[in-house]
Amino acid sequence: MTKEEKLAKLEEVFDLDAGALKEDMELDNVDAWDSMTKLSLIVLFDDEFGKKLSGDQLNSFGKVSDILALMP
Amino acid sequence: MPDFRFENISVSGISTAVPSLRVDVDSFKAHFGDEAVEKFKSATGIHSFHKALDGQTASDLGFAAAEHLLTEKKINRGEIGILVFVTQSPDYGRPNTAGVLQKRLSLSQDCACFEVNLGCSGFIYGLEMACAMLNASSSGKALLVLGETATKVTHPNDRSTAMLYGDSGAAALLEKRPGATEIICDLKSDGDRFDAIIVPAGGFRHPGMTRDSYIGKDGNERTLYDVCMDGTAVFTFTISDIPPAIKDFLAATQTTVEDYDCFSMHQANLFILKQLVKRVKIPQEKMPITIDRYGNTGAMSVPLTLCDRYGSDAEAGAVKVLACGFGIGLSWGTASFTIDRKDILPITCTDSRYNDGIINKIFPDGDTDKEEQ
């Protein structure tokens, strides 16, 4: 998956317009980064990549790029 | 899979009672703000729930459901040989509350009475225990009673739990009946995740802990005597362990979703229920939703959802149910059984509180102001 494809996936999960997310964005500055989005991210990783995201991993995400790094 | 099968036992009645007090989730807007409450509502699907009064206990709610069931079904109470009470909110430090229910329900001394501490999986575990004991007993009837007042172990400033739980009680009557459709239960547990949902203090592991509140890692305020949930761990559990558990159950029983009329699922939250629909491919119309009006009612989710769906049906007719309860423990179970619609009673409301008189009796300066019938 290209970086652009990954960002597009994340924008879907975050329920944001295309192009709204940039990889160097701090997640704490993204309004949509709430508990619901975190659950949707768990579902995305489980459905699409067969990976289990732990609470520690979710809490360790600082920037959008941290999530991209875990996406195959 | 460790499934349990019971022939010649039928679920011949189910009832549910909730406290009369209904709390609108919107009423929390003044406290948590409009945005937080709207987000909570859309994520969990909860719009209102029922809340027990001070001094109105889980056994009061279970009692109301059981009394309604035994009265409606015109059961000879002397014939009940087993009473299982499932709760995590007992009336006393000890003894267990089953004896109090035995007394209040006027059951005979020839009745095995005991309490079991289980939450969301409690109906499935309770069904299995009541059936197993009935199977081995000379008695013909067993009564499963459940009750929970989880609103009493939530901190008012904890937005992850303060609006989540609803209080309720339920009862199910099991009778030996030759030729009854098989009841099948599958029970699972993972003690490795015992702390995913926990009230840390109040038992004997951590005596004398402060009752002062603290701010948890999730930014919510609570005390060690309040329920603390690792939301991410619990959610991951529900999407990674529950769909396979239901699919394994279908495979082991050689049934498919088409063979069931109703999937009565633990009402954890709407997002989780939607995941179950998607992952197990359950037709949406076969999975009734009650969390919108009753909140997360723990073990009572399964009977409450059946009572809500079928309780007011005028017509008789068998309903083949697949039920699944999952949560605190972590503990989960799946069961299938058949029940006639006419044996599923409508949900009732109650304000009743048992006046045990105990404080006045043994404590010289007992404050009995809070006690009323």
Image (cartoon, rainbow, N blue to C red):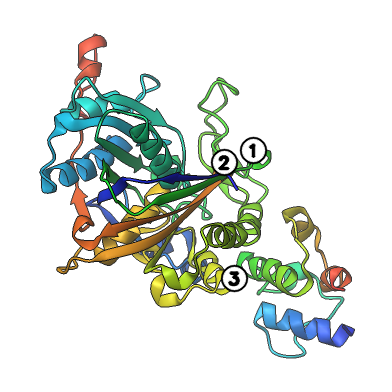
- The residues bearing labels 2 and 1 have C-alpha atoms spaced at a distance of 6 Å
B208 or B213, nearer to the observer: B208
Q: Secondary structure at mark 2?
A: loop
Cα–Cα gap, marks 1 and 3:
25 Å
- Which of the 4 quarters of the picture holds residue B122? top left
Q: Badge 3, how many Cα within 10 Å: few under 14, some, many 20+?
A: some
Q: Which residue has dot 2 on it? A: B329
In this view, A39 is above or below B227: below
Residue found at x 37% / y 30%: B136
Residue picked out by circle 3: B279
Do the numbered discs 2 and 1 sit on residues whose CB atoms are within 8 Å?
yes
Q: Position of residue B279 (x, y in %)?
A: 59, 70
Q: Amino acid at mark 1?
A: Gly
**Residue type, label 2:** Gly
Amino acid tagged 3: Arg
Q: Position of residue B15 (x, y in %)?
A: 24, 51
Residue B191: which numbered mark, if any? 1
Quadrant in the rendering for residue B173:
top left
Mark 1 touches mark 3? (CB < 8 Å) = no
Indicate the secondary structure of the residue bearing disc 3.
Answer: helix
B197 sits to left or right of B366:
right
Q: Earlier in the sequence, mark 2 or mark 3?
A: 3
Pick whichever, B151 or B137, lies toward us: B137
Q: Are marks 2 and 3 on the same chain?
A: yes
N-term mark: 1 or 3: 1
Q: For the point 79% across and 58% down, which residue is it?
A: A57
